[in-house]
Image (spheres, coloured by chain):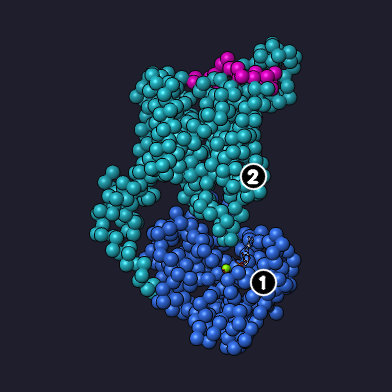
Chain colours: A blue, B cyan
Amino acid sequence: MGVLEIHHLSKNFGGTQVINDFSLKITELTLCCLVGPNGAGKTTTMDLISGRQKPSSGQIVFRNDDITGLGEHEIARRGIGRKFQVPAVFRDLSVRHNLEVAFSRETNPFRNMMHRKPKGLREKLDEVLQLTGLGSRLETEAGVLSHGETQWLEIGMVLMQNPSILLLDEPVAGMTESEIENTIKIFNRLKKTNTLIVVEHDMAFVREIADVVTVMHMGSLLAQGTIGEVEADPRVRDVYLGDPED
Amino acid sequence: MSGVVAKARVEKAGMTNLYHSKTAQWAVYAVFFVAVGVVPLITSDSFLLNQFAVYGVYAMLAVSISLGWGFGGILNLGQGIAFGLAAYGMGMTMQMQSQDPVSSPIPPFMLNNSLDHLPALWVPFSNTTLGIILALAVPTLFYVIFGTLVFAARVSGPFIAIMTLAVLSALNTLIIDMQPYTNGVNGLTPPSPLKLFGADIDPYGATSYWIVFGLLVLTTCGAKLLTQSKFGLVTQALRGDPERVRFLGYNVAVYETVIYAISGFIAAVAGCCFVMLVQYVSPAQLDTNFSIGMVIWVGIGGRFSLIGSIIGALMIQGGQSYLGDQFLNSWLLVLGGFFILVVRFLPKGLAGLLETVLGMVGTRRRSSPLPQAAGAADMPSQ
Ligand SMILES: Nc1ncnc2c1ncn2[C@@H]1O[C@H](COP(=O)(O)OP(=O)(O)OP(=O)(O)O)[C@@H](O)[C@H]1O
Ligand SMILES: [Mg+2]
């Protein structure tokens, strides 16, 4: 029984079939990497799970609840957190404020008028700062962070939400080698307590973190398995990985 | 003041800009309100006092715009909707206070429009308490309904500006057209001042000044506390990127509606005060130029700062009445030019200029932050 199950998902934009009868089961406390060539439909799949787009047909089930077609905020409240391909942080707010907003245990506007620092915020903030190393940048305006730091910040924001499943779209794009090393450590730690779906093109990175690799091609499932199985699959090499010398 | 400076520095060791210190901000509020509060003790010129009280009304309007636009990202060109509706509610209440159920049950202008009994619309305003409650509740409710419809449909920024302006304009026309009920373009001129708890509130007296002053302090400090709450933080986030806020679990449309309605409520309070002070209300209060003018005050003063917005309103309205008399024709031109300059070179208004200056002062006091910032970018985060 998967924590998140996608059944026969399809999506077309004005006649173009972008997702085509795609099904996927995500097991609790695993890290699943979603890979595939540009335009394969990886981001669109995340859009459909998180409610940014409504599927043309198919069903998305999270913890035995049908969440197909729910609003973005309702899906987020159920415990699905999302990081975007183009990092989306609040650029004119400080790093601290970005993380505070993301701590969304209480979402009622009137109750949120009564306080600034809700219970549990401090502990969560400390935990996330420790993980992301943004402690020295707390008062910095998010708009001036480096690319890698911005990625960290958005990952940190998702963690502040305390989601049970994290959808991370290209989290290491633009990071330096040492930053990627760090991310590998963090993700391997995270998957002990969380379920993650990570979209990434960097196969070296995928090799280090993935429990399961799912390959998409033209909106459909092409292959699935361990990194070894997938890399040995001739169809995957054909459409995505190319020749063995990387 | 130096005590405040020192304390603010210690409090936020990581921050150098005094502008962002909460202590310093509240200190500025305290200084401003004390300065404004002592006016009746200094002057006995009742005309001046009345005019200053009217500036207090403009200040409330500035706070309401800053809250909605600066902190909620809602560019509202139709704040005259709340201001004007409340003003009419107050005008009707004051008008009914001077009617007598037996000898003159209905306002004279209605007789001229051949009405022979009080229209149902007016009946609740015979009761002062109910009248004032309605004057505040109707506009607020209007904002709740309009906001719910517009924000749930995810109408984008520029369209909200156009829609608020259009609704204001329609309401203005409606009031003019409903001549028998509103006295059309002439508006209402209640013959005597507002009576509260049996006493006349002389518009030129200290009491009315204190009432407006008290309400200004309440609304401004309430708005300030709101911006400092978690609610205010969420609205500041959604002002930049509403889409992203949804994925954090917040219902963005509800947050937008709430801040829009609170902004409308403050404008409604201002509308009531205005009629108390000037003893008339006309469609001019719903004039589109006036509502756009409010946005100009706030744009120039600094929409991200409540007190900056107030200063903007006082400067421009003050300038208009003291300079404008001489250059009445060129005043609008000057104002327009000034606004364009501010938008172009100071997107955060005069308050933003202060922020930049204080930031530079703070930076100079600290030892070279630039290499540190550059170093942090390629430092491996641990
Ligand atoms: N809103 C949209 N309207 C029309 N077409 C869209 C829309 N969003 C995505 N597409 C198309 O759907 C296809 C899949 O896009 P998607 O962004 O999901 O790919 P991806 O796998 O994330 O690619 P990449 O690796 O480049 O990020 C692309 O051909 C894209 O042009
Ligand atoms: Mg993508």
At horizontal 66% and vertical 12% (from top left) the residue drawn is B108
- What residue appears at the point 65 percent right and 41 percent down from the top-left corner? B146
- Between residue A125 and residue A6, name the one nearer to us: A6
Residue A198 in percent (x, y) is at 56, 74
The boundaries of the magenta stretch are: B178-203
Numbered disc 2: what chain? B
- In which quadrant will I find the N terminus of chain A? bottom right
For badge 1, the amino acid type reads Gly
**Residue B328, numbered circle:** none
Q: Is residue A72 above or below residue B56?
A: below
Q: Quadrant of ligand 2?
A: bottom right
Indicate left or right for B354 with A226 as reference: left
Mark 1 CB near ligand 1 (8 Å cut):
yes
- Give the x, y percent position of residue A241: 56, 81
Q: Position of residue A180 (x, y in %)?
A: 44, 76
Rendered view: B22 above or below B123: below
Instruction: Say if residue A204 shows up in the picture.
Output: yes
Given the image, what chain letter belongs to the residue carrying mark 1?
A
Q: Is residue B196 magenta?
A: yes
Q: Which mark is residue B150?
A: 2
Q: Which residue is mark 1?
A: A219
SS under mark 2 = helix
Q: What is the three-letter code of the residue carrying label 2?
A: Val
Above or below, A112 against B135 in this view is below
Q: Is residue A156 above or below residue B263?
A: below
Q: Local crowd at mark 2 within 10 Å, few (<14), some, or many (≥20)?
A: some
The yes-or-no answer for disc 2 within 8 Å of ligand 1 is no
Residue for point 62% across, 34% down: B166
What separation in Å lies between label 2 and label 1 (alpha carbons)?
Answer: 35 Å
User: Which of the 4 image quarters holds residue B78?
Assistant: top right
Q: Nearer the viewer, residue B360 or B227?
A: B360
